[in-house]
Image (cartoon, rainbow, N blue to C red):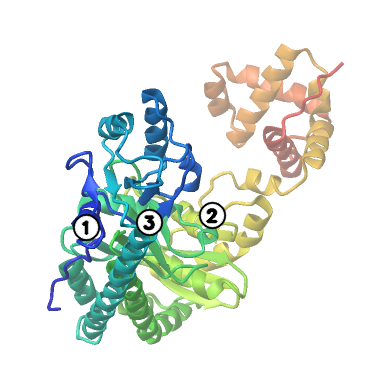
Amino acid sequence: MGNSYKRSPVITVQDVLSAPTLRLTSMSGTAGVGNPITAAHVSELTRPRDWLQGGELLMTVGLMLPTTESGCRDYVRDCVAGGVAALCLGLGHGLPYQAPPAPLVAAAREFGVPLLIAPDSVPFIAITKWIFSRIAEEEKRALEDAIELSYQLTAVAAGPSPLSGLLDKWRCVSGSLCAVLDASGGVVQLSDGVDAAFLQDAQDQVGRYTTRAKGWTAFGGAGRRELELHPVRIDNPLAFVVLERSADTALRHASNVLVSLLSLELERRHVAGEPERQRRAAALAQLLRPGLRRERAHQIAAGIGLSRDPLQIAVVRSTPEAVADLTVRIGSVLPDSVLRQRNSDIEIAHPEIAHPEVAGLADLLSGVAEGCAIGIGALVPVDALAVSAMQARSLVAVSARLGRAVDAKEGETVQLLLRLGSADVLSGFSTAVLAPLDQLEPRERVELQRTLEEWLRANGAWDPAAAALSVHRNTVRNRIDKIAALTGRNLDQADDRMELWLALKARAVTPSTDEPD
């Protein structure tokens, strides 16, 4: 076969007309003679559309054929809607028609449908046998071509550069584009000719892929190439193979072999990289030990590609069944990271994401580890990674309660903790503490609460609080004295201040809906 592949031909209306044993003639000129024929079917229905699948040579003797112009037009229109490749009218002795009716010929020409005439000496069964015999021959040829293509692809897969070689070979023999993407949609390998539109379509589908797809998915649309998305592994894909879908039978068969060979190569690469991943995980375990000297920490980090300060640790809690595959996916999404698997937890060391157009670590992990508890430690120097790890591990339980990733850099630590409590408890606590202020007139209540909040925020300093409120310092002092008298708190005591501050924060998290009488 050589290095190029000639697509298997299809049976067309012209092939049927050219068959010397059938002696068919056309009453509609050359219109539609290139239409492919997929089957032969006999029907005397005047509305055969619902019994067609498209591509049929529809044969009839016209037993129920309407003889009026409008009737013939309606009949041909219905056949066109059913996707017929051509109509064939049988003529002859004992049949309804000895010559093609003019209204039918006119309707066929109007709709551009080939109208073939079968002579009395050619029964429909002969036409049917001829068509299905040719279809069987084409299917056999397509299978032989697919086997030959598979041999060629397998030979390339055994060569020194299987991944690029397979894509180059496929492009050469089929003329089709192909892309191999990682679990996050990043490019692993592209065949020649892949343009931005193809790559964007492929990456969009990778982003929307769900395990509910269960296998390859075809996608495309009006005016767009139809592509196929093949995941390497179903539930937690290691990578994706995206290629143009072909209408050619041999190429469809061979594409399955291509996907299988690419999948084997990607799995082989993954397995081959396991010792290196284990080495990096062991080095990360050393970095997470408390008390590591700075020089030693930098030495270890440089050996596994973590030479940039600052770094942070994230912990993703999965299930024992899914943790291995999830580790692979996270590694694909975060290629600059180092991962370590501990039971059902995945510990991730990652440098600071400095580009504003790139999603933050919390968003990236939430996208790839949907439904998992995620704790993220603060950015720290490499010798302080143990601190970031301690923060991340402690925040995993908080994340599980809140149902979202939790980052140590979230400034409102008090509000974060308060959200762990029930709304009823928080509301009751804040109301109990602030009830004396709630009884005041609305204007005075708001004035005193705002003064209290600004004064506490200023750590009890009169001048900064007065400046924030745009009032005199004596006004602040008078208001604070009134608050102390109403609430019975000694605002010189840290515990009383803290209680009022927590009450204000609790109300901010769960504002009271009850108005004082």
Q: Amino acid at mark 3?
A: Phe
Per the model, the C-alpha gap separating discs 3 and 2 is 79 Å
Please name the residue that numbered disc 2 is placed on. 408
Q: Residues within 10 Å of mark 2 (few under 14, many from 20)?
A: some
Q: Residues within 10 Å of mark 1 (few under 14, many from 20)?
A: some
- Residue 352 visible in the picture: no
Instruction: Give yes or no for contact between labels 1 and 3 (Cβ–Cβ under 8 Å).
Output: no
Q: Amino acid at mark 2?
A: Ala
Disc 3 versus disc 2: nearer the observer: 3
Q: Amino acid at mark 1?
A: Asp
Q: Is residue 72 left or right of residue 488?
A: left
**Camera-side residue: 408 or 499?**
408
Look at the image and tell me in which quarter the N terminus lies.
Answer: bottom left
Residue 456: x %, y % from top left:
64, 34
Q: Which mark is residue 124?
A: 3
N-terminal of the pair, mark 1 or mark 3, is 1
| Count of numbered labels shown in the rendering | 3
Residue beneath the point at 81% across and 33% down:
433
Residue beneath the point at 50% across and 43% down:
50
Q: Which mark is residue 15?
A: 1
Up/down of 451 relative to 248, above or below: above
Disc 1 versus disc 3: nearer the observer: 3
N-terminal of the pair, mark 3 or mark 2, is 3
Residue 320: x %, y % from top left:
62, 75
Query: At numbered mark 1, what does the secondary structure look like: helix, strand or loop?
Result: helix
Q: Residues within 10 Å of mark 3 (few under 14, many from 20)?
A: many
**Camera-side residue: 149 or 463?**
149
N-terminal of the pair, mark 2 or mark 1, is 1
Residue 298: x %, y % from top left:
34, 75
